[in-house]
Amino acid sequence: MTENNCGWIAQTQASVAQPPLLGVQKADWLIIGGGFTGLSAAHSLAELHPQARIVMVDRQRAAQGASARNSGFVVAHENPSGDDLIGRVGNAYYQTSTEISRAASREVQSRVSRLKIDCDLREQGYFFAVHDPAKLEDAALRVQTLGETGADAQLLEGHALRQHLGTDFYQAGILCRGGNALLQPAKYAKGLRDTLPASVELFEFTDITRLERQANSNLRASSAQGSVEAPQVLVCVGPFLPRVGVRERAVFPLELSASLTRPLTDDEFDQMGRPDPWGVLSTRPGGATLRLTNDRRLLIRNTVELRRHDLDSGSLSVRRQTHLRGLQRRFPWVTDQHIQYTWTGHLSATRSGEPRFARLERGIHTVAGCNGSGVARGTLWGRLLAEMASGSQSPLLDKVLSQASPGWLPPSPFFDIGASVRMRYEACRAKSES
Ligand SMILES: Cc1cc2nc3c(=O)[nH]c(=O)nc-3n(C[C@H](O)[C@H](O)[C@H](O)COP(=O)(O)OP(=O)(O)OC[C@H]3O[C@@H](n4cnc5c(N)ncnc54)[C@H](O)[C@@H]3O)c2cc1C
């Protein structure tokens, strides 16, 4: 049996717990959900409305959901798909999308430096790397396409790549700098949380299950023990909008699981050639994400599934074995004893890969659908959502809204069947990379 124990959270000093919501609270703004998106929105709202009372609620500890549990890649440049390459049909869209992602990465860097957050941020980029060279099609054009959008991208193969990563597993990879970065996500989330301005009051262990309009036209959000009445509500709960009582069908949850090893010994690190910390993203959606952390641990994330509830401990043990096999393919000396932490988390996905970013009705604004790049995009979206709800406009907000078409989802069970088939197909295509 495997305990769901996030290694990033375990290595981050816990914040002081805040009490649950009791009775009736009145506020100018309510933010439901304390992940990157909600926390970033709270900081921005407090700047925009210094006199306002802002309440934030989270159903568990704030800053300990997906925002603490992810792999810590700050995405400024996505690996372009075949259609995105220079001269192809999707290139113009890819360029706009990258402008947004680069702004999102800068937003993270700016929050980290303004709020003095210690989160092991490394701005030296990361790799898109493959075991099977056929999975890095058009490598030279890919490097050129990344360069066109401002990335500093370099193709590495064989020995040169081995020297960076300390394994022969990867045959080819693009080292992509120029905004792409790595961080310790639980520390970043905690940093955003612990620096919330005094005008933001946080209630934890407060599961909102109803959002309704009152006779005076304000909104009331209710949990089992209390409620908040406010004219403006920002819903930042990732894939779980229906749990709050918001009817929404564009976003669905994907459950990912990851394992983190203990720090490598000097001998193990020597075998790898003592490389600098690194990160590798797969070029296939079903492939593995890996990191060598600043304190010499290996991280792997190589499962993804359509699930609305956490895996039980027996199922998590099975995923842990999948992590172990993935690690051993790259580092044959890794054993089960190396793995110190295994955990899961839910990200919000959409059919098109673009977010749901909208005013749902008067006073209710939401964003969800980060599709795996929510460290950067969640941070940016939080600010832009606060600005949109405050009536501000900007060219960047316009760009985000122009791409915010999440796509239609068929009703259950058609969607669940279709999505499962698609995910099995992607897992097969990515078999060599898992
Ligand atoms: C294993 C894993 C690896 C990932 N790797 C990366 C990566 O490397 N890079 C990257 O950019 N992204 C990655 N992601 C995605 C990233 O973690 C998310 O996009 C990001 O955390 C989304 O932030 P959020 O604030 O929108 O949502 P969350 O962090 O999920 O925050 C939502 C909050 O809302 C709260 N909530 C939910 N329902 C209610 C309710 N009814 N009442 C009150 N509160 C509620 C939750 O408790 C939670 O704290 C990964 C995700 C996972 C799970």
Image (cartoon, helix red, strand yellow):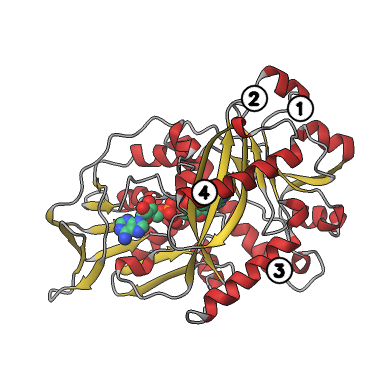
**Number of other residues with Cα within 10 Å of mark 1, as a class: few under 14, some 14 to 19, many 20 or more:** some
Q: Is residue 81 left or right of residue 217?
A: right
Percent position (x, y) of residue 1?
A: 48, 43
Q: Which mark is residue 272?
A: 1
User: Quick one: label 2 or label 3, which is nearer the N terminus?
Assistant: 3
Q: Position of residue 108 (x, y in %)?
A: 51, 45
* Disc 3 packing (10 Å; few <14; some 14–19; many ≥20): some
Mark 2 vs mark 4, foreground winner is 4
Tell me the SS state at disc 4.
helix
Location of residue 262 with respect to 328 vertically, above or below: above
Q: Residue at x 15, y 57 (%)?
A: 226
Give the number of the disc on residue 264: 2
Query: In front: 384, or 143?
Result: 143
Disc 1 on helix, strand or loop? Answer: loop
Name the residue at the top extreme. Answer: 266
Q: Is residue 362 left or right of residue 67?
A: left
Q: CA distance from mark 2 to mark 3?
A: 44 Å
Q: Nearer the viewer, mark 4 or mark 1?
A: 4
Return the disc, 4 or 3, that comes first in the chain's sequence: 3
- Is the Cβ of the residue at disc 2 closer than 8 Å to that at disc 4? no
Along the line of sight, which residue is nearer the eye, 196 or 119? 119
The amino acid beneath tag 2 is Leu
Q: Amino acid at mark 1?
A: Met
Residue under label 4, please give it.
Answer: 316
Mark 2: give few (<14), some (14-19) or many (20+) Cα within 10 Å: some
Asked if marks 2 and 1 touch (Cβ < 8 Å), the reply is yes
Q: Is residue 91 visible?
A: yes
